[in-house]
Amino acid sequence: MSILVIAEHDNAALKGATLNTVAAASQIGGEIHVLVAGENCGAAAEAAAQVAGVSKVLLADNAAYAHQLAENIAPLVAELAANYGHVLAPATTNGKNFMPRVAAQLDVAQLSDIIAVESADTFKRPIYAGNAIATVQSGDSVKVITVRATGFDPAAASGGSATIEAVGSAHDAGISRFVKEELAKSDRPELTAARVVISGGRGMGNGENFALLEKVADKLGAAVGASRAAVDAGFVPNDMQVGQTGKIVAPELYIAVGISGAIQHLAGMKDSKYIVAINKDEEAPIFSVADYGLVADLFDAVPELEQKL
Amino acid sequence: MKVLVAVKRVVDYNVKVRVKSDQTGVDLANVKMAMNPFCEIAVEEAVRLKEKGAADEIVVVSMGPKAAQEQIRTALALGADRGILIETDEELESLAVAKLLAKVVDEEQPGLVILGKQSIDSDANQTGQMLGALTGMPQGTFASEVNLGEGTVDVTREIDGGLQTVSLNMPAIVTTDLRLNEPRYASLPNIMKAKRKPLDTKTPADYGVEVAPRLKTLKVEAPAERQGGVKVASVDELVEKLKNEAKVV
Ligand SMILES: Cc1cc2nc3c(=O)[nH]c(=O)nc-3n(C[C@H](O)[C@H](O)[C@H](O)COP(=O)(O)OP(=O)(O)OC[C@H]3O[C@@H](n4cnc5c(N)ncnc54)[C@H](O)[C@@H]3O)c2cc1C
Ligand SMILES: Nc1ncnc2c1ncn2[C@@H]1O[C@H](COP(=O)(O)O)[C@@H](O)[C@H]1O
């Protein structure tokens, strides 16, 4: 049976996590269709049609889907799901928001955050903040799945030539309304897609000091992240949090600065290829996962690192 | 307005669990249990609504083993008025929890249902959204701010790119993120008082809900261990290693 992938996009462009999700779908096997639901989202649909491995794009262009309200998107996806064996979405805050609503509407379980495909009905997913990996099998007729992007290398963004088909049905539940959005603007790469990530923790002391990390990030083309403690203390905005309940990253290089290494933080970054830790406490648990640990005061070490890179 | 809060009994967040050698699950024998941290935030939010006069009754519900009474008592000590334990030794998936909650919602008719965004054991992040589908209520997930209006509630949500605010018709569902509030501790007198607050015990059968799991766990393994690396003595050595050994800069 075919697989339906729900695209993550901002109406104009596809978000990277869509490509990882298509990659997961191709491991399951079967024709891959992509749903682009939004408003004036033709450009995103065009982009989806180029993705390698995709044979059809369903375009649901309607004001009701403009802000991805779960109350409106879920009934659309549930309706389309009747024709598919699997429905996949990226495990982003958006995917996490509407997919369980789809699953419940279909009266099926949801598999959250899969990191591997074992077969068409069996998947691996982390539990207990990544301290255990469960292999789970679903007997449901439609498998509703969210995909952890770091578990799958992205499908190629080009090379495909899918047809685009308009989906007419408009679901406007009329029970929720978009009010506003405050999106962080940054010229840096997205945290979840960056090749290098440098994150600061409580040890940074305040928000201004994050400028030290930004200078290093500029040199390395890195994204800047943070621990929960740094976000809670108001040093930086919430969208920078890495961890069990923040963003999951797996860059080639992760530099943890003034971060102790609580299990909830490790859950978000321990699959990075190389980990560097800079911490003045040589007992800090972060050193147990770091390939290169530097016991030093960050206010000395980080400026020096920036200079010497 | 009545507020319904769902609390789950889970392994304490400080515990680093170990996988059982036969790969059937994680070892929970003699492990400290606690209220799911996101549920503590849910209880706190409800209590604050009551303190502001926006809520007049807080009903707290938990599903699980008899011992989940402890988490309900904790919520009662924090300010909830009454508890419901739906007792079962079955391992409940989010869908089953949502179905039971939908029945409780039907009975209790709350204006607001507050849940955690995620259980820290299953890391599912599903129940509130599923309850939304089953009841037809709107949802404000991953909330960092909740403001009641006239028949509506504005919820500010933590999303990947920053913050989003939605306005929901009531009754509505809210799931809590970490920054919604900072939960208080229960005082000793309140812990004593909580013992006398009503706690009803039911079973899934009382609600006519089938709770057998849909997913089969074939095995549970430990994640690949990371090899602890080396300590470098200086920034120079670090840069040298990054350039020549790891070749990542
Ligand atoms: C339900 C739940 C979910 C959570 N989710 C997350 C999550 O997603 N992400 C997350 O990160 N956390 C999460 N946490 C929080 C986590 O448990 C820790 O509290 C948090 O990660 C600690 O952040 P930190 O390492 O910055 O702070 P701390 O633990 O306070 O560590 C600060 C470190 O900085 C070092 N330091 C201080 N000054 C200097 C200096 N001048 N130079 C060098 N080093 C210095 C110290 O030695 C220390 O090791 C969660 C907790 C709960 C309960
Ligand atoms: N067994 C349970 N009893 C009561 N509430 C639950 C239970 N399981 C999940 N919940 C609620 O649903 C939230 C999200 O859980 P989950 O979908 O399992 O990640 C939790 O924070 C609780 O508020």
Image (cartoon, coloured by chain):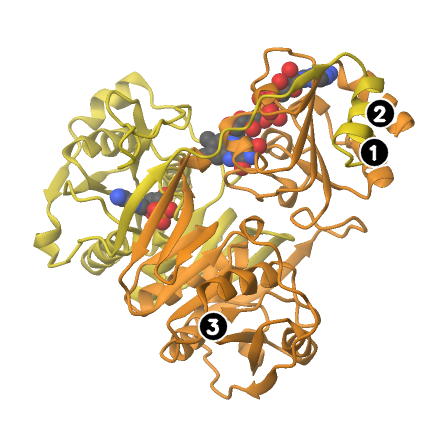
Chain colours: A orange, B yellow
Q: Amino acid at mark 1?
A: Val
Q: Residues within 10 Å of mark 1 (few under 14, many from 20)?
A: many
From this view, report whether residue A200 is shown above or below residue B150: above
Q: Residues within 10 Å of mark 3 (few under 14, many from 20)?
A: many
Residue at the spot of label 2: A305
Q: In the image, which disc is placed on residue A107? A: none
Identify which residue is drawn at 81% across, 38% down.
A217
Amino acid tagged 2: Leu
Q: Residue at x 56, y 87 (%)?
A: A165
Residue at far right of view = A307
Instruction: Locate residue A232, reporting x and y percent.
Output: 59, 33
Q: Give the distance between the C-alpha atoms of the residues marked 2 and 1, in whole angstroms.
A: 7 Å
Q: Are marks 2 and 1 on the same chain?
A: yes
The chain that hosts pointer 3 is A
- Give the numbered dot on residue A4: 3
Q: Tell me which numbered mark, 1 or 3, is placed earlier along the sequence.
A: 3
Residue A250 in view, yes or no: yes
Quadrant in the picture for the C terminus of chain B? top right
Residue A216's disc number: 1
Q: Is label 2 in contact with label 1 (beta carbons under 8 Å)?
A: yes
Distance from the alpha carbon under mark 1 to that under mark 3: 41 Å
SS for dot 1: helix
Give coordinates of residue A306: x percent, y percent.
87, 28
**Number of other residues with Cα within 10 Å of mark 2, as a class: few under 14, some 14 to 19, many 20 or more:** some
Label 3 and label 2: CA atoms lie apart by 46 Å
Q: Residue furthest front?
A: B245
Picture coordinates of residue A128, whole percent (x, y): 40, 36
Ligand 2 position by quadrant: top left
- Kindly report which numbered mark, 1 or 3, lies closer to the viewer in this rendering: 3
Question: Left of A69 or right of it: where is B58?
Answer: left
Going from N to C along the chain, the mark reached first, 3 or 2, is 3
Closer to us: A136 or A100: A136
